[in-house]
Amino acid sequence: MDRKIIFTGVIFGMIAIILGAFGAHALKKVLSIESLSTFETGVKYQMYHALFLLFIGMTNELSLKAKKTIYNLVVFGVLFFSGSIYALATKNLTSININPIGFITPIGGLLLILAWGVVLINLVKPLGNINKKSN
């Protein structure tokens, strides 16, 4: 599982770099400043979560069950959040009407928040056990 998580983090990171360069060079000429800024937000969040997956894949502080949950939340979160942002930012170029499915952006954001929450819960749980033992 760790290898799969790290692999996905690396792929997400590579794609974020490619899309960032594409945005900075090719899209800069054809998108408004606002749309380009929106596109860059998608790239940033994808990269943040690529690095997050690398951390998750390399840590021994989380159970396999927690890692699987985090992995699924992050993968779907990035696809929904960043993916829909890319589509929204480039809708004038692609003629794709993203508005009917625009609700997936906040769902993707919620999935990403939940992934961080799973980490928090799993790191706090052992602290609670230590406090109980010391009483």
Image: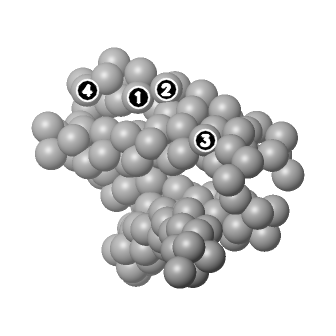
* Residue beneath the point at 21% across and 41% down: 37
Sequence-earlier tag: 3 or 1: 1
Mark 2, Cα crowd under 10 Å, few <14 / some 14-19 / many 20+, is some
Does residue 62 appear anywhere in the picture? yes
Does residue 87 appear anywhere in the picture? no
Q: Are marks 2 and 1 in contact (CB under 8 Å)?
A: yes
Sequence-earlier tag: 1 or 4: 1
Whether residue 110 sits left or right of residue 128 in the image: it is left
Q: Are marks 3 and 1 in contact (CB under 8 Å)?
A: no
Q: At which x and y percent is residue 135?
A: 53, 81
Sequence-earlier tag: 4 or 2: 2
Residue 133: quadrant of the picture: bottom right
Residue 40: quadrant of the picture: top left
Q: Secondary structure at mark 1?
A: helix
The disc label shown at residue 99, or none = none
Residue tagged by mark 2? 17
* Residue beneath the point at 43% across and 74% down: 110
The disc label shown at residue 28, or none = 4
Residue tagged by mark 1? 20
Whether residue 41 sits left or right of residue 109 in the image: it is left
Residue type, mark 4 in image: Lys
Residue type, mark 2 in image: Ile
* Residue beneath the point at 41% across and 21% down: 21
Residue tagged by mark 3? 55
Q: Secondary structure at mark 2?
A: helix
Q: In this view, which residue lies farthest toward the left? A: 33
Q: Secondary structure at mark 4?
A: helix
Q: Nearer the viewer, mark 3 or mark 1?
A: 3
Q: Nearer the viewer, mark 4 or mark 2?
A: 2
